[in-house]
Image (cartoon, rainbow, N blue to C red):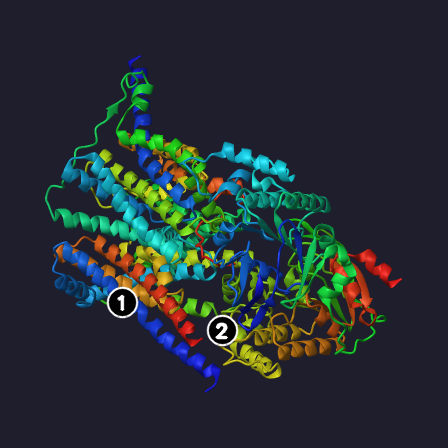
């Protein structure tokens, strides 16, 4: 792939990216969230068309317009979220859509071929099993066999270990080795350092849509790769405040919870947020951040453990109760959770308080009060809008976030949880939101900022914690933070990081 | 001119087209209907004239239009309340029948009451009967996850059969036909225009329209419509999903129930098996065409009852099968749906051109 | 002894007529099963059946050939299925509304076209009822013979369709595609299956089978075409698919329960008893709901049922 550039609106997701894959290698594609890894591979798999650049497969320049084209060229991709049909058998999932000879399904010979492939690459699987009964690791094997069954040369794996147990992970790496020995080439998208070290021959590191470099794994080290991946020093734009003496306002004690797939995703997580501080939660996406925010807000059931806010146990309380006791929460999905896009600013602003006497009589909502509130917010927060009664879907992202923030801040909270508060916003809006957070801190509110953007955390937080696989692996003052160590911890290298400190 | 102005202007233009398209689509449906009619050997011009005259040509005819509007409007509102909360209630017909039963029971038991009170009680009980019957699928949904589309469709037939059972046994009036006894005079809706069949029920329907309009401005209405607009956001904001589903279906079933009660108290004065010609089913179409807005529902309900009344006249004077009105209704729906697609397509093209 | 014999004859009669009453809903139910397996919910079966009843009638009336009648029944209902497909697959309108539109359109059109064909007559035109075929050697068996082997050809075809649709859905390449499209259209699309084409096909096959079910009323049961001749069978078919949890063999069981209950209550009514037969008739509607309650969210319904597929939406 040469000079690949792709833009989504004004965002340049890949900027003049060169990438080459050799026959018979495992090539790691390393980078933080939003570095452009998956986008680059989606281009190779025909899901997106690049604005510029060319793709050369086996010496020939090609255009790949659809996954079908990619498959014809021998390229297959296993997505992070599997594309399988749970009630169907393994074999059925693998052979559906194949050009078939004859009317009837030839399950017997398909099963034979699956077993042959399974044997050849060390992928243990029962072709007759039903997908719904399989563990995640087994489902992944089905996805890989699905690709192999179609006689491919290049296999792209997108974050293949994100849901695997360590044992399953080991088995996967062994499979990759046996596949490259048979002449396949593999591209392995990940953000975990030990994985590239363990499983790949070469690594290409992406950052901000650009290639930082391609190195041989054996010539590199985890700390070097971490530096390439994160690659920045601390920008101190907000003076951190020492909060060590402040009393705790929110405590999580050994909290465990399941994710949407009913897998235990928060594992005995403990955390303490103090009054008048901004505590940042750094980590790579999918390590339990969403679950963490949701258990605090009462939107996800806590399996075990305890959550205490200002001396009140809020574990598994109703969302409305928790909010009344002093929580404000700005969810990451501002478009589909934080706001109702078909609603006006005025309506969105009372979404969480429509029942209060201030905005509602016994029967009717108080339209005048709603209007007053909306006008005040539009003025105070400088929301650019054609009017308070137009649906908010006509507002820009920054203005939407302002409306959402305004509603949450108007609660006069004790604790404010914000999740990716500035993702997708321009610099002006980002600064504005940051100022609001600092203002809350200065007023004594405990602010928990969960963010995928490490820069953001290093810019505004007083303390920061790193989350990895559902656990807080380290907490530190921002003054003591070392970006390389944080990079390592985000990649799951706790031991190395603490050794580095000694 | 700022970008915002351009956006607003484009929007306004689009809105003009949007406003125009459904009417154009409906007219097209009439053209296709004309072709079908012509093929059956009927003089189309004459047929449509008779249809128009049937609906508007006499006080009696127009009274019947408003009479049908009463039923279609109430059931249409019933369905649109449910749809606003994304509860796909296809059971308005059954709820209507149960409401008719409730109204009948009041009508045959409180014969001695003063008229106003008897009528009021009849409306209340028909609301309760419809609401309770709609709560069955609602409870099945929140307790057991039973899809309400399927349960409400099936429960319609349970209601028909239950009414049929009652009319053949427990509440059968003496005589050959499976009718209930006639309701007392006090329970009968007064005719508001002499010489027509139009009764005071149209006022009830109008009040219900206003009621639904203001429902969305109430505390509970806001909760319900938020659950429908975005269930995730509603949950996040601390709203009670279970309560919203139950309240929505109760209101929905209750409105359909009132429609049924007034078919007894205003038109038949007895309960019979086929008391509704499918108002509750047509209501689904009316709710969709009226975009679940009370005013829109009222307009479409009126339009459809003109169609139905006119078709009846066509049947009486030209022998055009009454099935023609069903065909025409279906055609209107299909054409308006396709028309909506056209608007979307137009919108995309405009946006594409702006880039 | 004579009394015992009479009772036996009555029971045999009820069972045999139950099988005949089950046949049209069996056809429609199996058809709807195929459509729903691909993810299309069709509330318009009743309309399709009525078009089938009409198409079957005129085909047979004008040619005297039952095969042509049945083919025309399939085609008439199939045209409505194409429209249903257009509304639900191509322009992705609300599937409930699209289904109800089909129901109204089928009901209205069948009556109108009948009128177009025959005008107003004093005596309703009729066709001879489809003859019964005795299976040689089997139809004379005591008890079993009249119950199972003394029927019109459509009964045999309907019962044959139970294993055939099972094999079609579970054992053929096309069947696998239909199932995958109904469960996970994204996967199907990613593997090169044309989701839209498969769904159209399934809806049309479903419509054609509903058409045969409708024709059963005009060609086998009455010999006439009447408005609303199907009497709500389309809705029963819809219930059967849920009762049968989208499996042919259970749809058959459901259809037979319905047929027997119906035959039994007709018998009761004929006897002039005052037993509340309505409660028997409620069973076909109540049992599917009870089944759904018992399954508690694990219904086995195709995951993408009633969900339109938009290509490239991630």
Kindly indicate whether the residues beneath marks 1 and 2 are on one polypeptide chain: no
* Side of B188 where A226 appears, left or right: right
* Side of B197 where A193 appears, left or right: right
Q: Position of residue B113 (x, y in %)?
A: 36, 58
**Marks 1 and 2 in Cβ contact (< 8 Å):** no
- Circle nearer the viewer, 1 or 2: 2
Seen in the picture, residue C258 relative to C44 is either above or below; the reply is above
Residue at 48 percent of width and 40 percent of height: C290
- Kind of element beneath mark 2: loop
Residue with the mark numbered 2? A391
Q: Name the foreground residue: A168 vs B38.
A: A168
Q: Name the foreground residue: C300 vs A426.
A: A426
Seen in the picture, residue A229 relative to B89 is either above or below; the reply is below
* Side of A121 where A438 appears, left or right: right
Q: Which residue lies furthest to the bottom in this view?
A: B1
Seen in the picture, residue C9 relative to A11 is either above or below; the reply is above
Q: Residue furthest top?
A: C1
Q: On the rendered image, what quadrant is the C terminus of chain A found in?
A: bottom right
Residue with the mark numbered 1? B192
Residue at 16 percent of width and 49 percent of height: C115
Residue B37: image quadrant is bottom left
The chain holding disc 2 is: A
Q: Name the foreground residue: C167 vs C27.
A: C167
Q: Position of residue A294 (x, y in %)?
A: 66, 60
Q: Position of residue B123 (x, y in %)?
A: 39, 59
The chain holding disc 1 is: B
Q: Where is residue C27 in the image (x, y as percent from the top left)?
A: 33, 37
- Kind of element beneath mark 1: loop
* Neighbours of disc 2 within 10 Å: few (<14), some (14-19), many (20+): some
Residue B53: image quadrant is bottom left
Q: On the rendered image, what quadrant is the N terminus of chain A found in?
A: bottom right
């Amino acid at each position: 792939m040469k000079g690949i550039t792709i833009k989504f609106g004004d965002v340049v997701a890949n900027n003049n990216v060169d990438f080459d894959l050799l026959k018979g290698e495992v090539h790691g594609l390393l980078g933080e969230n939003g570095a452009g890894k998956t986008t680059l591979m989606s281009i190779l798999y025909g899901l997106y068309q690049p604005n510029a650049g060319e793709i050369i497969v086996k010496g020939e320049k090609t255009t790949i317009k659809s996954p079908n084209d990619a498959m014809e060229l021998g390229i297959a991709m296993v997505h992070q979220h599997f594309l399988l049909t749970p009630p169907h058998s393994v074999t059925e999932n693998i052979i559906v859509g194949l050009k078939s000879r004859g009317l009837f399904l030839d399950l017997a010979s398909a099963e034979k071929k699956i077993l042959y492939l399974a044997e050849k690459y060390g992928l243990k699987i029962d072709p007759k099993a039903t997908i719904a009964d399989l563990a995640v690791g087994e489902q992944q094997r089905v996805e890989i066999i699905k690709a192999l069954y179609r006689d491919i040369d290049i296999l792209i794996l997108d974050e293949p270990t994100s849901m695997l147990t360590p044992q399953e992970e080991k088995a996967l790496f062994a499979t990759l080795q046996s596949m490259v020995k048979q002449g396949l080439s593999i591209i392995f998208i990940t953000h975990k350092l030990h994985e590239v070290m363990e499983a790949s021959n070469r690594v290409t590191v992406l950052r901000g849509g650009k290639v930082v470099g391609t190195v041989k794994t054996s010539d590199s080290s985890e700390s070097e790769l971490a530096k390439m991946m994160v690659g920045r020093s601390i920008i101190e734009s907000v003076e951190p405040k020492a909060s060590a003496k402040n009393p705790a306002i929110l405590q999580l004690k050994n909290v465990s919870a399941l994710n949407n797939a009913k897998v235990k995703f928060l594992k005995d997580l403990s955390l303490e947020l103090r009054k008048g501080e901004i505590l940042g939660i750094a980590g790579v996406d999918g390590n339990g951040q969403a679950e963490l925010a949701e258990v605090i807000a009462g939107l996800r059931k806590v399996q075990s453990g305890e959550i205490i806010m200002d001396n009140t146990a809020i574990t598994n309380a109703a969302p409305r109760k928790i909010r009344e006791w002093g929580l404000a929460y700005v969810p990451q999905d501002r478009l589909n959770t934080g706001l109702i896009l078909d609603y006006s600013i005025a309506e969105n602003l009372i979404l969480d308080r429509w029942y209060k006497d201030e905005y509602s009589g016994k029967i009717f909502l108080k339209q005048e009060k709603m209007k007053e509130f909306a006008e005040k917010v539009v003025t105070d927060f400088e929301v650019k809008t054609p009017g308070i009664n137009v649906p908010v879907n006509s507002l820009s992202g920054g203005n939407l976030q302002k409306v959402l923030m305004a509603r949450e801040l108007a609660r006069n909270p004790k604790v404010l949880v914000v999740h990716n508060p500035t993702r997708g916003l321009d610099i002006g809006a980002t600064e504005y939101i940051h100022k609001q957070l600092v203002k809350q801190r200065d007023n004594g509110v405990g602010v928990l900022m969960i963010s995928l953007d490490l820069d953001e955390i290093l810019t505004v937080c007083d303390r920061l914690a790193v989350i990895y696989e559902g656990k807080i692996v380290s907490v530190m003052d921002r003054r003591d933070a070392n970006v390389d160590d944080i990079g390592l911890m985000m990649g799951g290298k706790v031991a190395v990081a603490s050794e580095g400190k000694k | 001119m700022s970008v915002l102005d351009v956006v607003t202007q484009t929007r306004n233009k689009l809105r003009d087209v949007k406003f125009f398209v459904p009417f154009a689509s409906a007219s097209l449906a009439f053209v296709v209907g004309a072709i079908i009619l012509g093929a059956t050997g009927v003089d189309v011009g004459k047929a449509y004239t008779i249809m128009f005259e049937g609906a508007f040509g006499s006080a009696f005819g127009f009274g019947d239009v408003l009479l049908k509007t009463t039923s279609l409007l109430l059931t249409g509102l019933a369905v649109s309340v449910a749809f606003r909360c994304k509860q796909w209630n296809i059971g308005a017909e059954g709820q209507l029948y149960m409401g008719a039963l409730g109204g009948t029971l009041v009508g045959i038991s409180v014969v001695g009451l003063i008229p106003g009170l008897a009528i009021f009680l009849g409306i209340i009980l028909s609301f309760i009967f419809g609401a309770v019957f709609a709560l069955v699928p609602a409870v099945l949904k929140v307790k057991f996850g039973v899809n309400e589309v399927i349960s409400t469709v099936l429960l319609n037939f349970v209601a028909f059969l239950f009414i049929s059972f009652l009319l053949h046994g427990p509440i059968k009036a003496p005589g050959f036909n499976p009718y209930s006894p006639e309701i007392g005079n006090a329970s009968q809706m007064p005719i508001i225009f002499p010489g027509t069949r139009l009764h005071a029920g149209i006022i009830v329907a109008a009040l219900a329209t206003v009621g639904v309009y203001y429902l969305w401005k109430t505390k509970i209405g806001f909760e319900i419509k938020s659950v429908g607009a975005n269930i995730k956001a509603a949950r996040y904001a601390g709203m009670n999903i279970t309560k919203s589903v139950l309240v929505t279906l109760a209101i929905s079933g209750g409105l359909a129930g009132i429609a049924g009660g007034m078919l007894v108290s205003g038109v038949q004065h007895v309960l019979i098996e086929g008391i509704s010609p499918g108002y509750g089913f047509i209501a689904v179409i009316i709710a969709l065409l009226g975009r679940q807005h009370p005013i829109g529902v009222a307009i479409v309900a009126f339009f459809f009852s003109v169609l139905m009344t006119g078709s009846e006249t066509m049947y009486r004077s030209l022998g055009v099968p009454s099935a023609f009105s069903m065909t025409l209704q279906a055609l209107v729906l299909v054409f308006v749906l396709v028309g909506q697609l056209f608007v979307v397509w137009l919108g995309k093209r405009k946006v594409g051109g702006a880039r | 002894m004579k009394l015992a014999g009479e009772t036996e004859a009555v029971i045999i009669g009820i069972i045999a007529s139950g099988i005949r009453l089950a046949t049209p809903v069996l056809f429609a139910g199996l058809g709807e099963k195929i459509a729903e397996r691909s993810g299309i919910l069709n509330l318009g079966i009743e309309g399709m059946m009525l078009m089938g009843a009409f198409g079957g009638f005129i085909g047979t009336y004008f040619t005297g050939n039952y095969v042509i009648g049945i083919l025309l029944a399939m085609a008439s209902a199939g045209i409505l299925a194409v429209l249903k497909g257009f509304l639900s697959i191509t322009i992705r309108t609300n599937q409930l509304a699209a289904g109800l539109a089909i129901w109204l359109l089928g009901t209205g059109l069948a009556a109108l076209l009948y009128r177009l064909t025959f005008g107003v007559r004093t005596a309703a035109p009729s066709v001879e009822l489809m003859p019964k075929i005795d299976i040689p050697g089997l139809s004379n068996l005591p008890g079993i013979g009249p119950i199972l082997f003394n029927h019109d050809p459509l009964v045999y075809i309907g019962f044959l369709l139970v294993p055939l649709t099972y094999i079609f859905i579970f054992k053929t390449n096309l069947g696998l595609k239909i199932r995958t499209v109904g469960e996970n259209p994204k996967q199907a699309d990613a593997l090169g299956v044309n989701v839209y084409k498969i769904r159209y096909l399934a809806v049309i096959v479903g419509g054609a089978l509903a058409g045969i079910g409708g024709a059963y009323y005009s060609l086998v049961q009455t010999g006439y075409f009447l408005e609303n001749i199907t009497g709500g069978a389309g809705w029963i078919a819809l219930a059967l698919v849920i009762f049968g949890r989208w499996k042919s063999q259970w749809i058959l069981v459901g259809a037979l329960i319905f047929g027997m209950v119906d035959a039994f209550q007709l018998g009761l009514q004929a006897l002039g008893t005052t037993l509340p037969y309505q409660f028997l008739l409620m069973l076909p509607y109540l049992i599917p709901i009870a089944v759904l309650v018992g399954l508690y969210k694990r219904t086995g319904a195709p995951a993408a049922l009633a969900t339109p597929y938009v290509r490239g939406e991630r």
